[in-house]
Amino acid sequence: MKTPNERPQTVKAGPPAAPAEGLTVHVRQVPGAPIVALRGWLRGGARVEDIPGQALISGRLLSEGTQSRSWRRLAREAEERGMVIESFGGHEAIGVSVDALARDAQQAVDDLAEQILTPAMPNQRFKLLRRHAMAELESQQDRPEVRTARAFLTSLYAPHPYSRPLQGTRRDLRRLTRDDCCAFHEQALAMGIVITVTGAIDEHTMRDAIHARFGHLQVAATPLPAVAPPPPHAARRIDLVLPPGDQAHVLAGHLTVPLAHPDRPILDLLGVLLGAGTGVRGRMVDRIREQEGLAYEVDVGTASGAGLDPGRFTVYAATAPARAERVGEAIRQELDRLLTDGISVDELEEARDYLIGSLPFRLETARDVATRLVEGAFYGPTVLPDVLAERWRSLTREDVIAVAREHLDPERMTVTVGRPESDA
Amino acid sequence: MSRLRSELTLLGAALPTPAIITMANGLTVATLDRPDAPVVSSALCYRAGRRDDGPQHGGTAHFLEHMMFRGAARFGASEIDRLTRGAGGSNNAFTTHDATLYEFAFARDRWHLALELEADRMQSLLLAPEDVDRERQVIEEEIAMYRDDPWDALEEAVFSKLFPRHPYGKPVLGRRQDLQRTDADVLRSFHQTHYRPENAVLVLAGAVGEDAIDRAVAAFDTLPVPAGDRNDSNAAAGRTGRTAFPRETEPQHRADQRLVRRAGEAPRLLIGLRGPAGDDSDQPLVDLLLSVLATGRSSRLQRKLVDGGQLCAFAGAQIAETLDPGAILLSAEVLPGVEPQRVEEEMIAALTKLAQEPPSRAEIRRARRMLIADWIFGHERVHQQAVTTALAMASFDAGHPLRQAERLLAASPEALHQAAQRWLDPAHGTVVGWSLPTDDAETEASEGR
């Protein structure tokens, strides 16, 4: 029997309390810690930017001061309440998150609205953020796994925006202006806003507060500009020379499907079967780490980075340079084995049980619930936990094998091997 | 005082005091019942870490942590991960210098599996030699991974200077030559010595139900009562019965400076000072002082180096909570075009100022509120509640987290100033680590200052 305080185990998109087309609002009480989590996302992001780096800097500028408060004052007043305010620019959205103690929920709504609707985007702060983005590009060069991933993504996606870092290049950043960022924010506002409020709150009070701050907006939900899909291509091999180091980095894979694709839940299951998820388990991990001891870290994904555009099948391992080819062979052989021999009923059951059994963790906290609600609003109900669980329950072995054969293909794999200079 | 009480109530709600029993065989079991939580997390913490490794076998505690997933008498090879996954759960483990902690998390209706898995591997770990050999290879790759990470490599170098004689100065993973000497017999001996019920604390957090303790007792009851004098101090202190290492209290060698140069790197700075032990009454005060220094955009270093001064991409400060006096670390990544030495001088100047004059009341209030919020956000998951409680009980006691929080909330500007003089004055000695860009191949050099 459900007790009055028991946490709801589901997240359904439900009828959004939206006062205008293009403005989606979800408010959900989540019992537990005395906190409130607010998320405000504007559609758009790097996939529709004109200049690489425009979305990242525009998003970050949202918390750099508003028309009524400087960034210093915003930060000071938030920190005096223990609030955590962050803004971001991603591939598909820019936005602001506010995490606060529940007693400060009303102030948190005001802060969120102020930063989303009336950012000042001061030129000095723009210049600083641009400089930070350049420093990030430099810092990432020190990470061999990032260099390897960068070469891999360029090969897979170019000229699609997923092929490049959110920062763009130094040259892109140099030609970006504060006016470009102001324009990008205006465009993002016009393409639709998603607001979620979750936590130890009174839903009616919060709904009223959101409507008071956002209800006047006339958001028409301008359709997102079309983005050309990444081009299909055949198998490739990329060899990369890295700075001196102890390990080689192997990253293999190819494009698969967008997040809301009907086969994506089955690809999730295939990912678990190959090694995604908890523990040292799954065919790739078992082979590369457990049986052959070739690597400490083996990461597998079947729709990694998927959003409105296709994600990718990936297997990554860092290994001793002399063993890099062995890792590449193991990846290919395990993929061949999957496509030739299929999967056992036991494997299907284990992967299914894992996916369904782990759903409560995706809804444990107010911040988890906020993330799920935003995902539902962005990608549609097929990405919500309830819908996914239903899909996983109904799968047969034949369904899984058919999807594997349709979407996974060793003949399309890009294999990127980064080796330290002395071993290259 | 009413504000202090209300803040303590908030903290206490985020991390409640556990119900605790000690079994006949010495195992301490604690529960944090959160009936509304959809999940349950277990944290089993052994008082065995890098500090307990033998002199020729550095990395044994960590090696054993890996082997704990390779099977035991009842649940054999791969069974732990297979069963965890089949139940939709997750598992993990980590080793520190002071302890090793194993975690499971399951949905609320199936968490009891964690008890069976933990009891089995505490009692009858397999340690097949061929598995040991394979896992050694995996750990060698783990060591290589950390060596290739610029921050990890720098931290290891700074710690070796900061703690030249204490195990805190040695890497938890050990070195390759140590691993080659560590075989199944060494691991078995370590397991038999340290993986005993009276040397462990089990914490269960989440919707555990009223019979959680009974279930834990039933699962671990078959483990033997230790022969001879039992270490009844299980719930009391992590130092009892363990090797006492010399506390590194002599003046530090301020002249030490370590440079690790690599082609194309961003300049990275890591300054180390020796800090108080986790249960020292100064520890929470130093924590608060470091928050004044570097937490949030209004903090001193953020204003001086990042948002205002525009010298660094980021700057931070932290103190570890360790059994013996540990490390205080300040870190920064320098923006392109900025002279690194300038950042070092600003950092040292900020420490000096903190040691010379107390922070303002407004700074203390802000830092305190940020720490309170951070505590509440940080313990929203039952997993973190279990881990915090288990680590506290293994090294100190169950009341340790709230006791230290109370000290933090009650600290006056004068008390903070005194703590800053004791621990944060760079005149007492610092270890400055730099990772600087250069076109040369990797070189290391120490130079005076």
Image: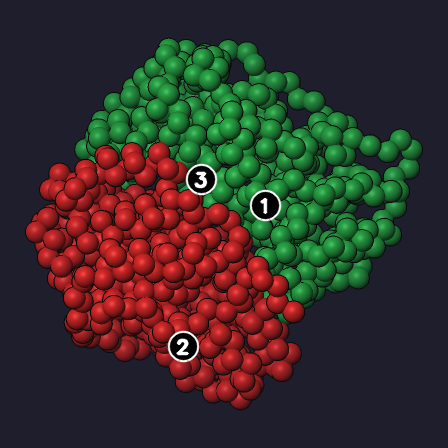
Chain colours: A red, B green
Q: Which mark is residue B385?
A: 1
Please identify the quarter of the rendering in which residue B188 is found. top right
Q: CA distance from mark 3 to mark 1?
A: 15 Å
Q: Which of these two is toward me, A288 or B5?
A: B5
The x and y percentages for residue A111 are 27, 47
The x and y percentages for residue A394 are 54, 85
Local crowd at mark 3 within 10 Å, few (<14), some, or many (≥20)? Answer: many
Q: Is residue B177 above or below residue B73?
A: above
What residue is rendered at 37% in x and 12% in y? B357
Q: Which of these two is toward me, A366 or A303?
A: A366
Nearer the camera: disc 3 or disc 2: 3
The x and y percentages for residue A222 are 16, 71
Q: The numbered mark 1 sits on a residue in which chain?
A: B
Q: Which mark is residue A382?
A: 2
Q: Are marks 3 and 1 in contact (CB under 8 Å)?
A: no
Q: Amino acid at mark 1?
A: Gln
The answer to whether residue B242 is visible is no
What residue is rendered at 11% in x and 42% in y? A123
Q: Which residue is mark 3?
A: B373
Q: Amino acid at mark 3?
A: Ala
Quick one: quadrant of the N terminus of chain A?
bottom right
